[in-house]
Amino acid sequence: MRFAMFRGVFLSLVATLTVLVPNYSWAAPAAATQKETAPKATGNAASTELNEKGVQAVKSNDFAKAETLFRKSLSADSRNLTAVFNLAGVYLNNKRQKEAIALLNQYIKEYSKDAGLYARRGDVYFSLKDLDAAGRDYEHALKLEPEYPGVPSKLGTIYTLTRRTKDAEAMLMKAVAEEPKNGQLLQNLSALFLINGKAQESISTAKRALQVAPNSEVYVTLGNAYETLGDVKNSLISFQRASDLGDTRPELKAKIEELKKVNS
């Protein structure tokens, strides 16, 4: 029964990780934040202003207007890589991946040392479910810029989906260091620690996740981690809490009944 529950946690982890990658960033060179990194612009004032207006259009969900503005930004300065980054993002949002890849390929040939272009192309390949190509681009982005924001969580997602759990653990540790209050990242890292046989680390990380965003999946991971260590009492408490929060899986109910007998 223990194996069945452990397998369930892993499958649930994969399902939650797939929603992390599509958080695509948008950036204006004059107001880029640490979490909205893009290639640097060249300093052309007109091009920069058009790009910034394009970002505002994106925030208003007017992607047609944003596309026009990003195109005008590039017409004013074809070297504005931030506008390239953002225009490719518009193509991606509109499911025009071929156009996004063609645009990025064109600029990567000339600006092969720019991490942002590879990161954006990785987003496009991921949307096409080409995990190998996406992984290569994310890896290259980190090789060029080891602290590039957002990429560790995306690469960790790909490593998990392809069962490279040790590599996924390392990437998610970087992602959590980048976003220590991100409950989803903490939840996923806790499950990866458990999958990799690190029950104590799983427990401590699960507790951090529960402080940020308590949910049944974290409690299931916590219950498995306690059971791995032979702590039946806390394992039962954790599984019951998962059930209280709405987890109706038959295997969870069976596990709770099994542990009640052992704990009686």
Image: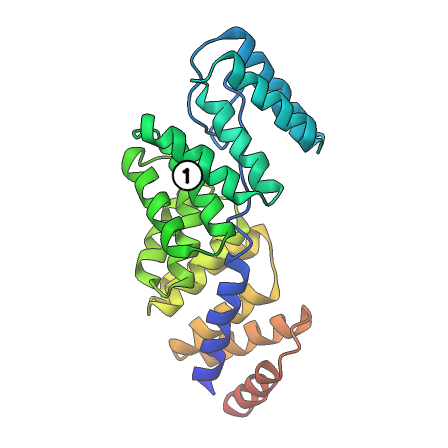
Residue underneath mark 1: 119
Which colour assignment does the render follow?
A: rainbow
Judging depth in this view, the residue of 123 and 152 nearest the camera is 123
Furthest-top residue in view?
Answer: 45
* Residue 107, percent from left and from top: 39, 28
Q: Which image quadrant is residue 118 in?
A: top left
Judging depth in this view, the residue of 65 and 235 nearest the camera is 65
Q: Quadrant of the C terminus?
A: bottom right
Residue visible at 40% across and 31% down? 106
Where 256 sits versus 187, above or below?
below
Furthest-left residue in view?
Answer: 143
Judging depth in this view, the residue of 129 and 171 nearest the camera is 129
Residue visible at 39% across and 35% down? 105
Judging depth in this view, the residue of 32 and 117 nearest the camera is 117
* Residue 76, percent from left and from top: 52, 12
* Residue 171, percent from left and from top: 36, 50
Q: Disc 1 on helix, strand or loop?
A: helix
Neighbor class of circle 1 (other Cα within 10 Å; few <14, some 14-19, many 20+) is many
Say which amino acid is labelled 1: Ala
Residue visible at 43% across and 71% down? 225
The number of discs equals 1
